[in-house]
Amino acid sequence: MKSVRLVTDGSCLGNPGRGGWAAILRHGDHSLELFGGEGQTTNNRMEITAVLNGLRALKESCRVTVETDSQYLKNGITTWIHRWKKRGWKTTSGSPVKNQDLWRELESALAGHQVNWVWVKGHADHSDNIRCDELARKAASSAENDSAETT
């Protein structure tokens, strides 16, 4: 099983507003940058979307280390999702879980992979996180309709 690093970030100009996401996949000497945007979204949706698109780019089951600066994303998928599912996708206050569609997609996209979630401090000395932030902001700035690009 290949070992892959997946570094992600999401950005939003206004929240809600125009949003962007970015993902960098690394395996050995190979890397792939993915990014895209949406015209009307939230930062949290873009954080989840970045990981989804990174996982979708994998052609086989992998050991994946996901590096994110989003506590919402990391805690949501590693801890909170179990309680949400037990409660019928409701929060402790009884309201529907936000972004439930993306959480369900993410859970499904994780199947078949061995995933380790790592939180990294945003805008710190982490070159891939900084690059993802740049790409996500660029995508958010140019987002009018749904789009996706690769470099």
Image (spheres, grey):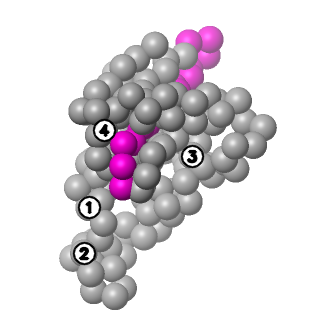
Camera-side residue of 39 and 101: 39
In the rendered image, the residue lying farthest to the bottom is 93
Please state the horizontal and vertical placement of residue 116, each as a whole percent of the image. Answer: 55, 47
- The numbered mark at residue 38 is 4
Gap between marks 1 and 3, in whole Å?
A: 19 Å
Camera-side residue of 79 and 132: 132
Which marked residue is nearer to the observer: mark 2 or mark 4? Answer: 4
The tally of labels here is 4
Is disc 1 in contact with disc 2, using a CB cutoff of under 8 Å? Answer: yes
Q: Quadrant of residue 70?
A: bottom right
- The numbered mark at residue 96 is 2
Write down the region rendered in magenta: 16-30
Gap between marks 2 and 3, in whole Å?
A: 25 Å
Amino acid type, callout 1: Gln
Gap between marks 1 and 2, in whole Å?
A: 8 Å
Gap between marks 2 and 4, in whole Å?
A: 23 Å
Amino acid type, callout 3: Thr
Of the two numbered discs 4 and 3 on the same chain, state the one appearing first in sequence: 4
Of the two numbered discs 1 and 4 on the same chain, state the one appearing first in sequence: 4
Gap between marks 4 and 3, in whole Å?
A: 20 Å
| Identity of the residue drawn at 51% across and 56% down | 74
Q: Is residue 133 left or right of residue 13?
A: right
Of the two numbered discs 2 and 3 on the same chain, state the one appearing first in sequence: 3
Q: Is residue 66 left or right of residue 124?
A: left
Please state the horizontal and vertical placement of residue 142, each as a whole percent of the image. Answer: 39, 28
Q: Is residue 55 visible?
A: no
Which secondary structure type mostly characterizes the magenta part of the structure? strand
Q: Disc 3 marks which residue?
A: 68
- The numbered mark at residue 100 is 1
